[in-house]
Image (cartoon, rainbow, N blue to C red):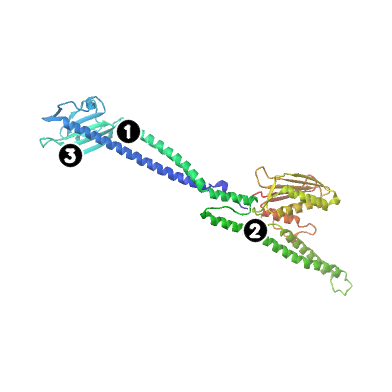
Amino acid sequence: MTTSVRESSYSLQTRLLLAFSVLLFFFLGLTGVILDRAFINSVEGGASESLQVQIYLLLSSAEEDSGEFYFLEDLREPRFSQLNSGLYGYISSTAYGVLWRSDSARAFTMPNSDFFQERIDVGETEFRRFEDEQGEVYFALSYGILWEDGISEYSFSVVENAAPYYSEIASFRASLWYWLGGVAVLLLVIQFLLLRWGLLPLRRIANDLKKIESGQDDMLHGNYPRELQGVTDNLNLLIETERKQQSRYRTTLGDLAHSLKTPLAVIGGLIPKLSNQENQANVVDRQQLDAVNEQLERMNQIVSYQLQRAVQTGDGSSLAKHVNAAQVVGKIIDALKKVYADKNMQVQSTMDNSAIFYGDERDLMEVMGNIMDNAFKYGAGRVAVEIKRLDASARGLHIIVEDDGAGIPIEKQDYVLQRGARADTLVQGQGIGLAVVTDIVNSYEGQINVGDSDLGGARIEVRLNANR
């Protein structure tokens, strides 16, 4: 039995969409991180340049006398004169510490106590970032100089609260991820549409195969992309080869069976003549003739069985035409009523006109012909037939045939339905009909059950295409 895994696996489109989505989010995420880092470096670089300008401002206005610094005019940056303005200026030396601080730094305590003890080489600048106990971030830039006397070394430092800069960074970051998210959604939609367009030929092949499976078409037609043309050509070749093989097998089997039937008929005609020659000096032994006659009957059963199998497709191929089951069964009922006209059988039929058999019409006629022929043959006067779909959406066919005859003994019900039971093992007079039916039903991966009918006779229940 072939099981389908379509329900438990992703489609090709879903696989590609997931793969591209992971790649897209990884790429956009990496891009976002790089842009964010670049913007932070840019902001910090801008802060360093801004502080450098403030240091030059202090240098241009500062005067020194006996190690003390003073300014001849007000600084052009008003924040140096505003208490806790967020911009603080310092002049220091490694020997004496802070020599001057701006008015804004009167109430400000440096988070780094060793800040003014570190020596800055003359002509060098050092940009630093640090936090206070409350988590407030500050930028600091120090510049080392050699004063006019050529002996004294000082450090001019400017410290600025970094909150405005990080506010700008936070605003940029929010805008960045907002736009990257929008771009990601847009690219996903475009990617989905492109995948659907790119995989459209595969969906066309799937739809065309469904048409072949349902009997609406017999080959793959239309123009396919160059990459798929070889696949479609090979599929068409496979379908054509399969059908030719089926036809060849049926023809060969039928010819073989017919070839055997003629000499068997000749032998069967000679046996009665030999049986009547009992007075010819024991030329023919009576018991031997009976044994030959018994074997001849079994050979006839084998040939008949193979002739009946020769008219079926034998593999339940879904590449056959679809057949209206009610119409086929209706024809069989009409024919059997004429054959068994002397029994005046009453037939109760319940048939769904939408019930479709997906296979060879000869297979359905063989199944229903054998089952209903037994019902008419062994029924006392009533036969009930029901044809319907397995359910509203299934392709399967559900068949029930009942009669009011003697039925099939319980000990033989399992035997007649044994898969692979050979015709030459069937008991005399039982017939080979159900063995043929079982073979056909099994070839369509169906089920057949024998039981007792409410009418008093046998009940045969068949499910075709049940697992396809």
| Gap in angstroms between the C-alphas marked 2 and 3 | 94 Å
Q: Earlier in the sequence, mark 3 or mark 1?
A: 3
Residue 179 visible from this viewpoint: yes
Task: Tell me which corner region of the image, top left, top right, bottom left or bottom right, holds residue 102.
Answer: top left
Q: Are marks 3 and 1 in contact (CB under 8 Å)?
A: no
Question: Where in the figure is residue 396, as x and y percent of width and height?
Answer: 67, 47
| Residue type for callout 3 | Gly
| Residue type for callout 1 | Tyr
Question: Which residue is denoted by mark 2 in the rendering?
Answer: 243
Q: Earlier in the sequence, mark 2 or mark 3?
A: 3
Question: Where in the figure is residue 262, as x and y percent of width and height?
Answer: 78, 66
Does dot 2 land on a helix, a strand or a loop?
helix
| Gap in angstroms between the C-alphas marked 1 and 2 | 76 Å
Question: Where in the figure is residue 368, as x and y percent of width and height?
Answer: 74, 51
Does dot 3 land on a helix, a strand or a loop?
loop
Callout 3 crowding tier (Cα within 10 Å): few <14, some 14–19, many ≥20: few
Is 137 left, or right, of 76 in this rendering? Answer: right
Question: Where in the figure is residue 430, as x and y percent of width and height?
Answer: 79, 57
